[in-house]
Structure formats: structure tokens, C-alpha cells
Image (cartoon, rainbow, N blue to C red):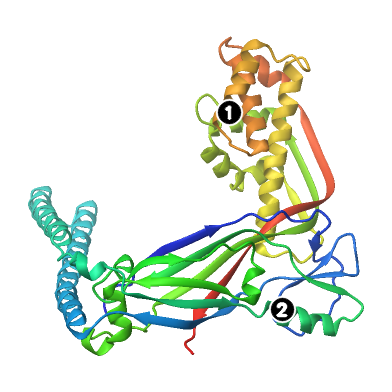
Amino acid sequence: MQGKIARLLTGVASVGLCVSAIASPTLRGLQAKNPTSANIYGDTGNASLLYVAPPTIGDLRVIKQSFTVDTPTCQAVASVNKTRLSENKTIEVLADQILSLEQLRSGLIAKLANKEITQPEFDRQHALFTGLIEKSTQDKLNAVANITPTPAALLERAGYYAVVAKAQWDDAVSKIAAANPTLTVNHIPTADAQVFVSVLGVDGFAPNELVARVNTGNIKDVSSVVEGLQIDVEPTKVGACFMTFPQIVGSSADAYPFGVTINYTHQFALSTVVKAQYNLKDVYTYLEKTGKSGGMFSSKSWSEVTESHEVDELFKISIVFETNATQSEKEAEQKRVREYLLGSAVADMTAKVVPAGDPGKTGAAIASETLMKTCGFNAYCAGAAAGLTILNGIFGKSGSSSNLTKVLNVTRTYDSTVTQTIKIPGSMSFALRQQ
């Protein structure tokens, strides 16, 4: 395919499915036979239950199509395409030229640092390269701004084609059930399903110039693709020409440059042994340094902190996984443990300096504002933010932070075996296969 490929997410459908609390998939103690490539899970509370995850790969098939373009229209598309390809080539040449000049300028700076060139000569050459870079950059901006527009008439809808996304999930469930006759085998319950329809740009045209509209329908959950999820696509005249008259537009692209991804989550019961040891004073100092606006977390800074391995060192966290957890499962549990310990430590700090149930008017007001504005629905973050703000309200203005650190100079230990239900992300990709 000539030219650069651009990706456009042209259709997104989001749904939420309430997962039954009875379903608690886990890997623990799993001895089932699996003659397929699908992932299977046992159940924490019922040894006779088995869950089968959706396959990662499925098929897309064109089931019907009708295009309304003719030879003169597609000749007009070919003319625009030829011009666009020439313009894109000019932009690529300018981009390469800018890169080369920037590399030369960087080399010049290195020469000066190594005393391989005099300051006057450096100044002369540096000014020359900078001027050339600025000119080439402006030329590139002008070239992008002056790309030949596609006539509006060629962007009108020109028929339709329909594809069906289908996965062999039922087939996997049937084979696994046959191999394990004493077990009850089910599709794993899914939630948070999202359908992403991707269209590739072809030659000189962007994705939104090929497709005018995509309809994914109303899916309820991932299981709907077992019987087939129909997706209706309405191409523009440009897109229809690439599919109907590729010999006229001169493209070697696939007739249907099209793909579908479905992202979802499912529950997973992860059993872990967690140990930690920390000093409240050290935790307070760390959070005061890391937090923003007087120690109050924003949702962004909270995410950065709980994804940092610095917290593991601060709390001396040790996590032993009782099952063969995947890397994504481990990362989700590690983040949960960090959030729990941070929230627990801040609550511990607040309890030591504020009478239970009476944080004071100032502290309560600040806590309320914090809960409203910083952390959204993350209870760990909201609790930590409120607690830190209360502490700062009491000690930050009175100049008695040294008294606070004395009060907080206490070592805590944490030792727990936990079965925690977490959300595991999953994804299904569908490749197009024509009939």
C-alpha cells in the first residue's frame, strides 16, 4: 500500500453488564482438560464450575454490498489521488530534510562540547542550520496546509456493505465440556464491552474520506458475537471507487481496508499473600513531597504514585501469588495493594492526631472539597487526599510539622492472605475474510 497508513476509530459502542456475584473465576486448583487454545478458569467457591474466556481472534465476513459509483466518478478520484500522492511525497522529503538538519545541528553542539570547533565558527554554523531548519519547517507547514482538498461531491455516500464479526466461542465451550463431562462449562461473564471499528487510509486519502458512516448496532455484551455481530458501513464515493474500480484508482490496497476490535473486562479472583512494613512518618514525608497543592492529590498524581515501584520500597511490600497469575493480573493486584496501604496509612495518621468522628470544621470542609474535586470514584485516593488535607490543615499553618513527624514516628506491619476480585482486561480482534 502506497503512502502512510492512518488509523481512525470510526465507531465506538460502550455497554456495561452486571456480572453475577456468584461467578468468581480463578486459576486456583484448576485441573480441567483443555483441547482448545481458549483460556479457562475454575471457580473459587464451586469446584464443578468452569469458565471459558472469549477467543482472541475472530472472522469478519462481507455478507452483502451495493455500490453506486461509475467510471467517470472514479477517474475523478484517481486524479485527486495522483495529486495527493505527489503532495505527500513533498511533505515526506521536507520531513527527512528537517531531521537531517537537526542531526547536523546536534553534531555541531557535540563538537563544541569536545572543543573540536571554535565558538565563532560554532555560532556561524549553528545560525546557518537553525535558519535552514526554520525555513524547511515553514515549507512543510505550508505544504500540509495547501494539500488539495477532496471535492465535497466525492465524499458523499455511495452505497453500503455489511460485515459480520463472529468468534468460535461456542465451539470452544462445547469441546471443553466434552473433555470434562463432570463439570459445568460456561462462557465467562463479561462487562465494559466496547466495539472499535478501524479503517485504514489508502494512498493519498485519510480514513474519514473513505468511510462516511459506521453502525455497530446495539451489543449487550461480548457473547453477542457468538451468533455474529453485524456492522454496516457506508463508504464515500472515494471508498467505493477503491473497492469497485481499483484498476482505475491505481491502488494495490485490499478491497476492504477494515478491522474490528472488541475490548472487555471479566472478573478474576486472585489469591495473594501480602506482607509490608512501614513507618507512618516516612509515608507522610513521601506523600507530602509527591502530592500536589499542599499534599492534596489530583487523580493524575494519585495514578502516577500508585503505579510507581517507589511505593513498594517505601512500604517494603512483598506479594506472593498463589496462582500462576499473568503479568496484567499481577500489575492490577500490585496497584490495588499500593492503593490500600497508602489509604490505610493516611487513615492511621489522621486517627492519631484527630479525635475519632470529630475532624474539626476546617478539616471536615477541606475533606469534603477534596472528595468532590480530586479523585472521582477511587475510594482509596479520596480517603488519602482527605486525610492528608486534614493533616495539612492542622499542622501546615501552625508551623508544628516537627510535632507531627514525632507523633507519626511509628512502625506498622501488614500481613494478610487475600482473595481479591479484580477486573481483567480482554480483547478480541477480527480480520476480514471475503466470501
Residue located at (27% from left, 68% from top) = 156
| Residue 362 falls left or right of residue 70 | right
Tell me if mark 1 has few (under 14), some (14-19) or many (20+) residues whose alpha carbon lies within 10 angstroms of its own: few
* Image height of 233 relative to 288, above or below: below
| Three-letter residue code for mark 1 | Met
Which label sits on residue 170? Answer: 2
Q: Earlier in the sequence, mark 2 or mark 1?
A: 2
* Image height of 173 relative to 115, above or below: below
Split into 4 quadrants, where in the image is the N terminus? Answer: bottom left
Q: Position of residue 121 (x, y in %)?
A: 8, 53
156, 392: nearer the viewer: 156
Q: Secondary structure at mark 2?
A: helix
| Three-letter residue code for mark 2 | Asp
Q: Position of residue 329 (x, y in %)?
A: 69, 59
110, 348: nearer the viewer: 348
Q: Residue under circle 1?
A: 372
| Residue 263 falls left or right of residue 208 | right
Q: Position of residue 412 (x, y in %)?
A: 79, 33
Q: Secondary structure at mark 1?
A: helix
Q: Are marks 2 and 1 in contact (CB under 8 Å)?
A: no
Q: CA distance from mark 2 to mark 1?
A: 45 Å
319, 176: nearer the viewer: 176
